[in-house]
């Protein structure tokens, strides 16, 4: 097999812990995305995968590669920072778009439906356009 | 201990594959466009993690670079789709 199995037992236990934690959290997040009823509930579920799901698996990968290659491996941190910085931006954008669409259709279940001034539009209209 | 690591790697691959399948189900079923975009975002993350775990198992660094590209591409894709839903066009 690969060099992965040359890890000492205590490090292997850490890698196993992080792998199981990360993949299980990601699965739970995806199950929430599958199971929850409304979009505003569902938007919260995949963040399990983007926070500790990603962090744990990247930590497992970082530990493994640092041991196998016998030097400090920091490439994983690039992915980690990329995912953790961009996910809140993405989801805020998506939530705002969904709110805008629901209001435009006059859906009674969202706050501010049917009014002319749409707060979801404000930040982009005060800017460049 | 080696068996435990083998089991953990297998479980991680199965769980991430299941997570990707559930996200794909959300893309197919919807019911609305924003649900599909959210499902695509979750699918990107699950696939990226699956690439990393598979790279660990095979002992190759090449899958890691693919995971980096997926992470960046997922961000750009989801933001542009959300902007399209919000404004009706991507570049104004």
Image: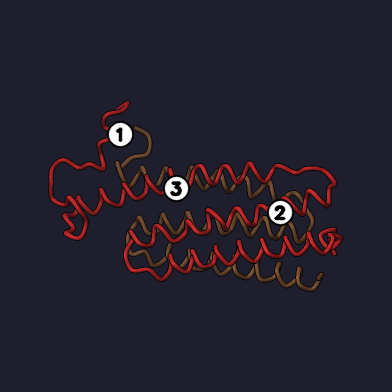
What residue is at 34 percent from the left and 56 percent from the top?
Answer: B33
Are dots 3 and 2 on a single chain?
A: no
Residue under mark 3: which chain is it in? B
Q: Is residue B22 left or right of residue A76?
A: left
Q: Residue furthest top?
A: A128
- Per the model, the C-alpha gap separating discs 1 and 3 is 18 Å
Q: Is residue A107 left or right of residue B50?
A: left
Q: Which mark is residue A61?
A: 2
Point out residue B78 in the picture as x, y percentages from the top left corner: 44, 47
Chain A colour is red
Q: Which residue is mark 1?
A: A124
The chain to which mark 2 is attached is A
Q: Which chain is brown?
A: B
Q: Residue at x 57, y 58 (%)?
A: A53
Q: State the separation of the CA atoms marked 3 and 2.
A: 26 Å
Residue bearing the label numbered 3: B78
The residue depicted at 54 percent of the width and 45 percent of the height is B73
Q: Quadrant of the C terminus of chain A?
A: top left
Q: Nearer the viewer, mark 2 or mark 1?
A: 2
Horizontal arrangement in the rendering, residue A95 relative to residue B73 (left or right): left
Name the quadrant of the N terminus of chain A: bottom right
Q: Name the element at disc 2.
A: helix
- The chain that hosts pointer 1 is A
The answer to whether marks 2 and 1 sit on the same chain is yes
Q: Is disc 1 in the same subunit as disc 3?
A: no
**How far apart are labels 2 and 1 at the CA level?**
39 Å
- Compared to residue A122, the image places residue A47 above or below, namely below
Residue B83 point in image, percent of width and height: 36, 42
Observer-nearest of B49 and A129: B49
- The answer to whether residue B55 is left or right of residue B49 is right
Residue drawn at 48 percent across, 47 percent down: A87
From the viewer's perspective, is residue A110 above or below residue B19? Answer: above
């Amino acid at each position: 097999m690969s060099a992965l199995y040359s890890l000492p037992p205590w490090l292997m236990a850490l890698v196993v812990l992080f792998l199981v934690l990360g993949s299980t959290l990601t699965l739970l997040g995806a199950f929430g995305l599958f199971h929850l009823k409304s979009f505003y509930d569902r938007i919260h579920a995949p963040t399990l995968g983007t926070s500790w799901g990603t962090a744990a698996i990247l930590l497992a990968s970082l530990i493994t590669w640092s041991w196998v290659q016998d030097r400090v491996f920091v490439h994983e941190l690039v992915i980690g920072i990329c995912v953790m910085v961009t996910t809140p931006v993405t989801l805020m954008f998506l939530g705002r778009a969904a709110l805008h669409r629901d209001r435009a259709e006059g859906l009674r279940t969202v706050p501010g439906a049917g009014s002319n001034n749409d707060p979801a539009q404000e930040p982009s209209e005060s800017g460049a356009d | 201990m080696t068996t435990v690591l083998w089991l953990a790697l297998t479980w991680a691959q199965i769980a991430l594959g299941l997570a990707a399948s559930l996200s794909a189900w959300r893309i197919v079923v919807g019911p609305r466009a924003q649900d599909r975009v959210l499902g695509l975002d979750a699918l990107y993350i699950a696939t990226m993690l699956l690439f990393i775990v598979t790279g660990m198992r095979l002992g190759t660094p090449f899958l890691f670079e693919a995971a980096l590209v997926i992470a960046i591409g997922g961000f750009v894709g989801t933001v542009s789709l959300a902007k399209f839903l919000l404004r009706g066009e991507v570049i104004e």
